[in-house]
Structures are given as structure tokens and as C-alpha cells.
């Protein structure tokens, strides 16, 4: 088993913190579900695209769940850990394992997030009529996050990540 270098671990922690901050800085409440919209998806999608599926899952899950806890949405944190972790994982896995363009990988990750929250809110927290009220805003958040990440991804890849291989085993 190969361990992360100090540099890789530091970058991973930085992306988790940036996801938390991006989620907290701009958060727009959705009264119907007591959730909120945010731009944290931008950072976690970038993390998945740049560092691969495992890092994407860790950044998405931990960074986003921490924001839920710090913002007082503690009841959402376990769901967010799974849903946003899956979003980061999907982005990273698609980028690693397919020839899909990075824009498509990010968009699919955003769609997975919206569907994940729809299912979780519909089954666990509320009911499907209520959950559907947040589906469109979550879908728009995922798409916007993917589009913003797609602007940042090529810049970050060229500036920092061409020399670091996060996906090597």
C-alpha cells in the first residue's frame, strides 16, 4: 500500500477546507426542505477531476458535511457525507476510467448529487413531493458547480497538478 506524500496530503486537506469555506460563504436557504444552495460543488468537482475518485470522495464528503455541521444543518451532515462524497467519487472515477471530456464528468457528478439528495430527502427526511421542491435547485447547483469547476480545472491542472499524480497506485 502506498501512502500519500506530505505534499499530496496537504493539497487534499486544503481542498477539504476550501470546499467547507465555499459552501459556507454563499449559502441560500431552501425553506421547503430546510436545506440550502451553495458553491461548494465547484471545489469538490475540481478535486475529483484533479485528484481522482478517492480524493474526490473525501473532499466532497468531509468538506461538505463539515460545512453542514458548522452552519447548523447537522441533521443533513450524514446525508451530505454520502451524497457529496459520491459526487466527488463519480467525477474522479469518470475522469480516471473513461475518455469522457472533463466537462461531462463534472455535469454527471452534479446530476448524481441532485438525484442523491432527492432520494435521501424523499425516503429519509421528508417525502417525495417535498423532496421534488429541492430537486431543481439542487440540479441547478450541480450544473453551475460543474460549469465553474470546468473553468478552474484546466488552470489548476496546468499550474499545479501536472507534476503530481494522485491516482497512481
Image (cartoon, grey):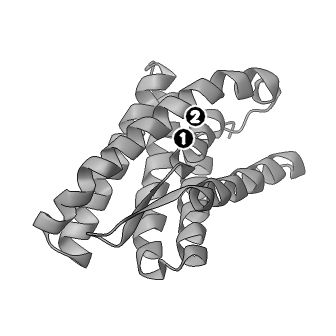
Residue in front for this viewpoint, 141 or 118: 141
Mark closer to the observer (2, 1): 1
- Disc 2 marks which residue? 49
- Position of residue 57 in the picture relative to residue 11 (left or right): left
Q: Residue at x 73, y 28 (%)?
A: 156
Return the x and y of residue 6 as percentages of the image width and height. 88, 52
Please indicate, yes or no, whether residue 3 appears anywhere in the rendered image. no
Return the x and y of residue 163 as percentages of the image width and height. 82, 26
Return the x and y of residue 141 as percentages of the image width and height. 40, 45
Q: Is mark 2 on a helix, strand or loop?
A: helix
Q: In which quarter of the image is residue 151?
A: top right
- Disc 1 marks which residue? 45
Labels 2 & 1 near each other (Cβ < 8 A):
yes
- Position of residue 165 in the picture relative to residue 110 (left or right): right
Q: Distance between the residues labelled 2 and 1?
A: 6 Å
Q: Residue at x 48, y 30 (%)?
A: 147
On screen, residue 141 above or below 75 = above
Crowdedness of circle 2 by 10 Å Cα count: few (<14), some, many (20+)? many
Return the x and y of residue 48 as percentages of the image width and height. 57, 41
Mark number displayed over residue 56: none
Q: In which quarter of the image is residue 134?
A: bottom left
On screen, residue 74 above or below 6 = below
Outermost left residue? 129
Please indicate, yes or no, whether residue 66 appears anywhere in the rendered image. yes
Residue in front for this viewpoint, 51 or 111: 111
- Position of residue 43 in the picture relative to residue 143 (left or right): right
Image quadrant containing the C terminus: top right
Amino acid at each position: 500500500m502506498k501512502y500519500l506524500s506530505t505534499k499530496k496530503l496537504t493539497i487534499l486537506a486544503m481542498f477539504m477546507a476550501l470546499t467547507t469555506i465555499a459552501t459556507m460563504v454563499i449559502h441560500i436557504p431552501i425553506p421547503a426542505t430546510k436545506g440550502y444552495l451553495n458553491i461548494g460543488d465547484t471545489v469538490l468537482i475540481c478535486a475529483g477531476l484533479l485528484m481522482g475518485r478517492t480524493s474526490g470522495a473525501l473532499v466532497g464528503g468531509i468538506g461538505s458535511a463539515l460545512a453542514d455541521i458548522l452552519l447548523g444543518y447537522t441533521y443533513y451532515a450524514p446525508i451530505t457525507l454520502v451524497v457529496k462524497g459520491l459526487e466527488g467519487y463519480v467525477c474522479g472515477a469518470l475522469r480516471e476510467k473513461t475518455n469522457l471530456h472533463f466537462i461531462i464528468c463534472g455535469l454527471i457528478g452534479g446530476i448524481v448529487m441532485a438525484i442523491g439528495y432527492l432520494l435521501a430527502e424523499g425516503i429519509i427526511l421528508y417525502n417525495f413531493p417535498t423532496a421534488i421542491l429541492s430537486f431543481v435547485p439542487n440540479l441547478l447547483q450541480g450544473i453551475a458547480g460543474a460549469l465553474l469547476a470546468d473553468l478552474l480545472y484546466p488552470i489548476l491542472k496546468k499550474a499545479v497538478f501536472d507534476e503530481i499524480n494522485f491516482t497512481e497506485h
